[in-house]
Amino acid sequence: MSASRPRVCVLHTVAALPAVFAPLLSELAPGVDPYHVVDESLLADTVAHGLLPRTTARLAAYVTHAEAAGADAVLVTCSSVGPAAEQVRALTTVPVLRVDEPMADEAVRTGSRIGVLATLDSTLAPTADLVARRAAAAGTRITLDTTVCPGAYDARASGDQARHDALITAEARRLAADHDVLVLAQASMASALSGLPVAELGVPVLTSPRGGVAQLVDLYGESART
C-alpha cells in the first residue's frame, strides 16, 4: 500500500455504475482515492459467449494497468466476470476484490433457503456458485434457487429504469414466501431495493454494492474512513 491515501481502481462493466459506487465510496471509505474504469464490452462478450479465456486475460490486463498506475487494490463490480477476478488474483501483488463476496457470506449467515435473482443468465451461475462455495467453506447446508427476472434487462437497456425495478420487485415478491433471504446478483439491480421493504416481503433482500465497498475498510482499517 502506498504511503498516501490508498488508491483504488473500481472496474465496471455497466456505464451507470460509477454513479452508484461514488456516493458509497464517499460514505464508507472517504479515506481512499478511487478512480473508475468502465468497459462494457467485458460484459457484452460474457453475455454473448460465456466467460472466455480472452475476457479473463483482458481483465488481468486492466489489473496490471491499475497496478502500474499506482493502485493499491482493484474492486471488480461485475458479478458476471467475478470468476475471472478470482483467477486474476494469482497474477498480481495487489488485492483484487470481487464485489459480491460479502453479499454471499451474508446470505449464508442469514438463512439456509437462498433465492438468487438476476436479470442476465450470465450472472446466475457465477453468483450461485459463489454462494454455494461460501456455504461449503462455512460448513453450512443450504438450498439454492435461481431466477432471471423476465424483461428486466431489456427494460434497463432501453432506459426504462422504473420498469426494470418493478419487474425485479415482482419476482422478489413471488419468491419471498419460500426463502429465508433473497440475493440480487448484479450491482445494477440495487436500484430496485427501495421497492423491496423487508417488512412487506418478510425476508431480507441483499445487494452487492455496499458490502463490496466495505471490503476497503477491511483492507485499510481506519485510514479508509478518514
Image (cartoon, rainbow, N blue to C red):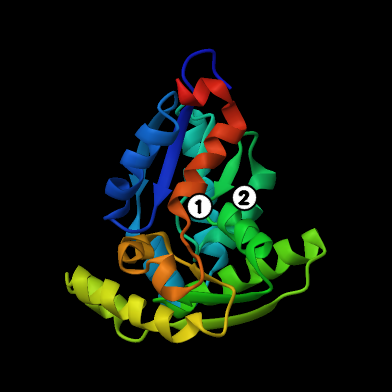
Q: Position of residue 34 (x, y in %)?
A: 39, 32
Q: Is residue 66 left or right of residue 90?
A: left
Q: Image quarter for residue 10?
A: top left
Within-10-Å neighbours for mark 2: few <14, some 14–19, many 20+: some
The answer to whether residue 222 is above or below residue 183 is above
Say which residue label 2 marks: 88
Q: Depth check: give the residue in front, 197 or 183.
A: 197
Q: Position of residue 207 (x, y in %)?
A: 46, 60
N-terminal of the pair, mark 1 or mark 2, is 1
Quadrant for the N terminus, please: top right
Q: Amino acid at mark 1?
A: Leu
Q: Image quarter for residue 31?
A: top left
The answer to whether residue 169 is above or below residue 29 is below
Q: Is residue 72 left or right of residue 119?
A: right
Q: Residue furthest top?
A: 3
Q: Is residue 26 left or right of residue 4?
A: left
Q: Depth check: give the residue in front, 69 or 104.
A: 104
Within-10-Å neighbours for mark 1: few <14, some 14–19, many 20+: many
The structure residue drawn at horizontal position 21% and vertical position 69%, both measured from the top left corner, is 161
Q: Secondary structure at mark 1?
A: helix
Q: Position of residue 138 (x, y in %)?
A: 78, 59
The structure residue drawn at horizontal position 44% and vertical position 35%, both measured from the top left corner, is 28
Q: Position of residue 22 (x, y in %)?
A: 32, 40
Residue 155 is labelled as: none
The structure residue drawn at horizontal position 49% and vertical position 80%, both measured from the top left corner, is 176
Q: Amino acid at mark 2?
A: Val
Say which residue label 1 marks: 59
Q: Is residue 19 left or right of residue 111?
A: left
Q: Image quarter for residue 53?
A: bottom right
Q: Residue furthest front?
A: 199
